[in-house]
Image (tube, helix red, strand yellow):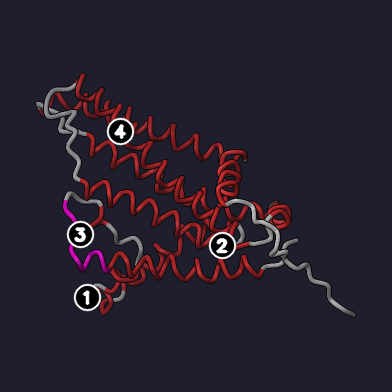
């Protein structure tokens, strides 16, 4: 018995990367799950803004002022998107394998690495778009706060370090979800791994006295990134801890996951 393999025609012009990215962008919103995830992020952002304004207006008469500003709106609106964006990246990778879309995708573009790159670019664009939405909705909320509340409400001061840290955390979380999705190629397994494994490992590290004493968890757990969401730039040690922990949690799943995508049998 002889095996027949479909060879990739390397002489044919590849599909432009920009077109692949546009296709992946369309996949992000064309499915019901993707559409409702995006809609949920927008609705939650507006809901957070309304709740913050209500709480500030209620507490203002008793406290004398409402110290709520642009940085507060932006920071809180990044929390729900930080949970939902990685799920979008997971669906972008795994939905094709669970719904047999990979067969059509890799038939039209057999160079799998180009499809992976397009998905990565799409995921990064989605992360930056989420930060932009948080900035826009936060600006609207801050304008309303400045109109209905007394000073210092409505302050526009926000350190660039705060914005940079929030953006990096969104991108890191999304890449972590992407890595687990590529590793498992299964939506439930990737979602469970994303939400459970980092927290479980971080908890175990905190419970071991020897590791806790030497702050080993800060170098391993991806959840120890609070220094990036501050009004000052992290110091060299905090940057090193962030880079090392995320290199472990993003790099390992990403390398083995992309290797699996390149070699997995398409059914």
64 up-or-down from 118: above or below: above
Instruction: Name which of mark 3 and mark 1 comes first in the sequence.
Output: 1
The percent position of residue 44, horizontal first and vertical second, equals 41, 35
Find residue 213 and name its label: 1
Cβ–Cβ below 8 Å for labels 2 and 4? no
Q: Is residue 100 among the parts visible in the rendering?
A: no
Question: Seen from this angle, which residue lies furthest left?
Answer: 64
Name the residue tied to disc 4: 138
The percent position of residue 121, horizontal first and vertical second, equals 49, 52
Q: CA distance from mark 2 to mark 1?
A: 35 Å
Name the residue tied to disc 2: 182
Q: CA distance from mark 3 to mark 2?
A: 31 Å
The percent position of residue 42, horizontal first and vertical second, equals 44, 34
Q: Is residue 181 a member of the stretch shown in magenta?
A: no
Q: Residue at x 39, y 62 (%)?
A: 199
Give the residues in magenta: 232-240
* Left or right: 139 as drawn, with respect to 249: left
Instruction: Name which of mark 1 and mark 4 comes first in the sequence.
Output: 4
SS for tag 4? helix
Cβ–Cβ below 8 Å for labels 1 and 4? no
25 and 32: which is toward the camera: 25
């Amino acid at each position: 018995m002889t095996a027949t393999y479909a060879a990739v025609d390397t002489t044919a012009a590849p599909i432009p990367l920009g077109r692949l990215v546009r296709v992946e962008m369309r996949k992000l919103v064309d499915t019901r799950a993707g559409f409702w995830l995006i809609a949920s992020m927008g609705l939650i952002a507006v809901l957070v803004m309304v709740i913050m304004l209500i709480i500030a207006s209620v507490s203002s008469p008793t406290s004398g002022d409402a110290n709520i500003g642009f940085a507060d709106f932006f920071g809180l609106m990044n929390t729900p998107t930080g949970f939902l964006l990685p799920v979008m990246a997971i669906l972008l990778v795994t939905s094709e394998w669970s719904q047999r879309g990979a067969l059509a995708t890799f038939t039209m573009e057999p160079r799998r690495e180009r499809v992976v790159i397009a998905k990565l670019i799409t995921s990064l664009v989605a992360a930056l778009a989420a930060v932009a939405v948080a900035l826009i909705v936060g600006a609207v909320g801050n304008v309303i706060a400045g109109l209905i509340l007394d000073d210092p409400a409505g302050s526009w001061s926000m350190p660039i370090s705060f914005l940079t840290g929030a953006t990096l955390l969104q991108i890191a979380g999304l890449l972590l979800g992407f890595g687990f999705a590529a590793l498992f190629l299964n939506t439930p397994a990737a979602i469970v791994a994303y939400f459970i494994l980092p927290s479980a490992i971080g908890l175990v590290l905190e419970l071991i006295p020897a590791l806790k004493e030497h702050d080993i968890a800060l170098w391993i757990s991806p959840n120890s990134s609070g220094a990036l969401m501050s009004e000052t730039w992290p110091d060299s040690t905090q940057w090193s801890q962030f880079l090392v922990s995320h290199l472990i949690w993003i790099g390992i799943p990403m390398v083995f996951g992309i290797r699996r995508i390149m070699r997995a049998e398409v059914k």
